[in-house]
Image: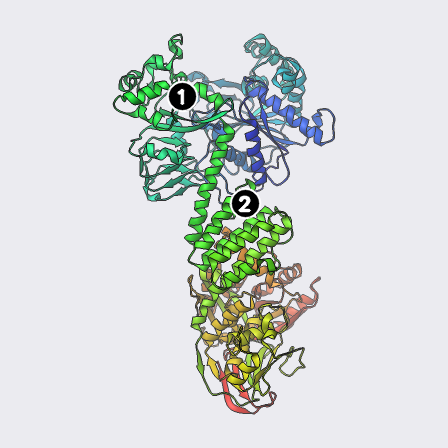
Amino acid sequence: MAAGVEWTAIVLTCRRGGGVAALQRELELRRRRGALGRRPVLVLALEDPWAGVGSGGATLNAVLVAAEHLSARAGCTVVSADALKEARILILHTGREFSFDDCGRAFTCLPAEQPRAAAEALVCNLDSLLGTVTQRLCVGSPPGVWVCSTDMLLSVPSVPGIDWDGFQGVRVIAVPGSQAYARNHGVYLADEQGLVRDIIYKGTETQIQQCAGPDGTVPLVCGVVFFSSSAAEQLLATHVIPPLDACTYMGLDSGAPPIQLSLFFDIVLSMAGGMTEEDFVKGGGDASVRSARSVLWTALRAFPLSMACIPDASYDYLTTAASDHIRSLTLLPSSTSHLRFCKTAHSHVDQPLLLEDGSSVTNCLLEGAVRLAAGSVIQHCHLQGPLEIGPGCLLTGLTVDSSPALQGCPLRDVVLQGHHVRLRDLPCRVFTLTGRLDDWQSPAEEATYLNISWAEFFHRTGIRKGDLWDAETPQKDRCLLSARLFPVLHASEALGLEDVLWLLAPAVSGERLARWRAAWRMSWQELLPCLDKAAELGARRDLFFLQGQHKVQCVLLGRQDGSLLPLIRSAVHEGYHEALLGTLDEVASTADDAGIAARALACIADVLGCMAHGEGGLRSGPAANREWASAFGRLESGDIAGGVRELAAERLKWMSSPALLVRAARHYEGAEQILIRQAVMSSCQFVTVCPVELPPLGHWVQVACPARLDLSGGWSDTPPITYEHGGAVVDVAVLVDGCRPIGARVRRIAEPELRLASLGGTPWGEAAVELVCRELGHLENYCQPHAPGALLKAAFICTQIVQFPSQKPLRDQLMENFGGGFEVHTWSRLPHGSGLGTSSILAGAVMAALYRAAGKVAGTESLIHAVLHLEQRLTTGGGWQDQVGGLVPGIKIGRSEARLPLRVEVEEILVPEGFARILSDHLLLVYTGKTRLARNLLQDVVRNWYARLPSIVQNADALVNNAEECARALRQGNLPLIGKCLDVYWQQKKCMAPGCEPLAVGRMMDALQPYVYGQCLAGAGGGGFLYVLTKEPQQKETLHQILAKTEGLGNFSIHSIEVDTGGFSMEVVGCDPNSSTHSGEDMAM
């Protein structure tokens, strides 16, 4: 949730019998979703103490209950006014029932989505108002009590411009409106200082003109008022004074007689400057209201009542006219609204092209051909085509069982609704049908039903007045609201939608009429108190997650970039995770693409992680528990469906605690990595090896490689991003302090064994680690990256020098194919975690040397793909940029398309003559002294990519675009533009992997910033080397002096780098690797 007011308490009031438990659940769900702010707020759904307490009585009761709860939290034993002093309380009144939504105006769904919300949910008018008041309207206001009606759509600018300096008293919020609109609404009469003198409701033309401003508009009452803390305390104090005590639950419990009060015309009006005490008190209806007004005058009169009329704000009252309601759901909201309406919101539509512009579909599942005309709305419906819905229609609450009755039935200008009704303890479904132009309360003689006169309706259907109204019902009360039109129960038959649709028939149907007459029917007026809000909200949730399951299938199978994480969070919050897990299992097991299955498994990991609710440990961790081994084995063998089934069966044993859930999530990510490996290993088809003469026994094949600098685009080369999105990385091969820092050498030896040695920092150093492998079993841990010699073991397997697994012993394999074994030495002058691509480049060096020592040779393109294969077998899961950077000479851009098999293509970047030297003079390496831990960074990036977080998807686009921009800058030889690309790249890296900039590195970059065109940590970040592009050449000593004076940097060092235009070298030398003489083969690749 964006920064806004942090509410101490939010109170939602409803009428008696208004389903308070269901509304409390709705508030709690919003709190869990983070929609009510960051701090824990008190959220209360509160039933009015009396049926007709009015908005004023409901406000006083809400203030009392909020103060009581806050007093209890503060440790008080009685209600204390002090609880209000620093509190920020929001009271929302749900008000009267609404003809077009069984849950009232507050829960009327709007055709909008909130893609930035942490959890996906339907957007109700309540949510819109919460966003408006919290993020905009109330920002900057002092502590106090805000009261807001929920019977309108309210839009205000992002900066409403309300001046709160020196504010005291009470303030009403107004929006500008036309004088014509004001004739049926309330307006404020205010003086030049903005102090309210009167409130005029449905005034005369003269009265309304008095309220107009210079532009002719009038300040409309929009149902929002703010009480300062002191004013709220005074209002609270009246709850013990008769007859106002009758407005609260305490009065109800004390036996006080009921009283009805208006918020605006009883409470707020008492502070209007143009009122006299006599006029105000006399304006009350009966004696009890006059007495209440007298108390309010005494308590509140001293507080100034000011008005804030917000320019460009808009207010749209939700009327009982169907035409108005349909229009409000199909017209775009004002430009000041924080919402953007869309044609389909939270809906799955099989054939979206059948929905005309100007129509609206919210929380629906529309299967098959459902045609919807402009000016029509469908909400909370599951329908199957073929269906044709004409203009001017509103359909809500229809289930899939209703579809047959609708097929072939022409609908135009009608409101068709399905309702959940509870008759005592009997739940049932009732359907109502009305016309768009019908008026609920006009007498039948002058009104319509289904847009035709009642007389015409009686003539067409055979229905008589006596069927609808009792004989003693006065003519003025015979209206649509009281007409017993709608079948509820039948003695012998089940009722359905067809039992109201027949009312549209052009000719009388005797059978239908008899069935209709035989049914027990109710009027809308009688149905209203029986509406089951809890059942209706539950049905909406069921449908929301049912269409959500279809969304999951469409997003995954369609390889769409939409994020499913908000939906996953909602499913967990609301208890729909099992259904979602089932859908994800189905997608993973039936997809004919390993990439789709991998993303589905990643989504399951997210579900499990969300179910842990932030407990149970870190998401990243080991994933090799033996209990999951069988499922992993199936995936490794290519049996994805069987593997997914076994994963699901094993998952059931890990659902009982947060710790187990997190561990299960890790294993699902391990399973996903298996499928990523299989996808990446499709690149093996681009590895071509040619036979050459075997070097003599004992002769070394020695390879030396430059390091690499990634100038832009890194992370876009990382699987699965590289084959799902496409990647582009600009790399430079560089000498560090004048030499190629990475190398390997291999020779054949007589003994049938593998000798593996890491020489540390130089080709001539002492072996830091030595291993001898004489059996295949010694190679088993090749896929454990931290095991000694794992990379070298994997290289022997990937070059197919050793077949593993195999029935043939290692000794026999080596003797039969090579007449002996191999000895391998590796070295790197670079520190661990340097960010210069060491491990991948070293893998390339080892594989090049192994191939040659085994009598084969692989070109550079083959080596690039061979290293991809090796790193997947090794399970480090790297991308391709490192080996491109270190194996291909000079300055280049590597690219991969969004497809499998994964293929990397490299293009040399042709720079101006002499520019490579200029670039070398301006580039420096600074060792930060911090070791990066890229493993967890990689896991986080892959997790966020599979979740398709919008920021990550946008950043992936930006990485590729910046790489192409950097390539253009290099072709131009434009150092400042290259530096700008480096700075952009560093911001992109931080977006991709938050936390990759240690504090000391930040200080270092700040110190260097005035002297460089651009700078960036190499590789994934988090430590290692920082490379800088200096404004002046040869700045090594200058930068050293600057950093030496900077506090808190630790051990740093500065190194010169030089563009290596020669590429890696490979030579076959004699038995002494230190000898300068060799057998004549020396090639730069």
Q: Give x and y (percent) for residue 633.
A: 53, 62
**Rendering quarter of residue 137:** top right
Q: Using the image, determine if residue 908 lies above or below residue 544.
A: below
The front one of 698 and 1077 is 698
The front one of 506 and 766 is 506
Q: Amino acid at mark 1?
A: Ala
Q: What's the residue at 44%, 46% (across, down)? A: 551
Q: Give x and y (percent) for residue 109.
A: 46, 34
Which one is in front in this view, the residue at disc 1 or the one at disc 2? Answer: 1
Residue tagged 1: 491
**Rendering quarter of residue 874:** bottom right
Q: Secondary structure at mark 2?
A: helix
Mark 1 and mark 2 in contact? Answer it, CB < 8 Å.
no
Q: Residues within 10 Å of mark 1 (few under 14, many from 20)?
A: few
Q: Is residue 612 left or right of residue 675?
A: right
Q: Using the image, determine if residue 48 lies above or below residue 915.
A: above
The front one of 497 and 1015 is 497
Q: Give x and y (percent) for residue 122.
A: 48, 38
Q: Secondary structure at mark 1?
A: loop
Residue tagged 2: 569
Q: Indicate which disc, 1 or 2, sits on the residue closer to the N terminus.
A: 1
The front one of 566 and 343 is 566
CA distance for labels 1 and 2: 45 Å
Disc sitting over residue 736 in the figure: none
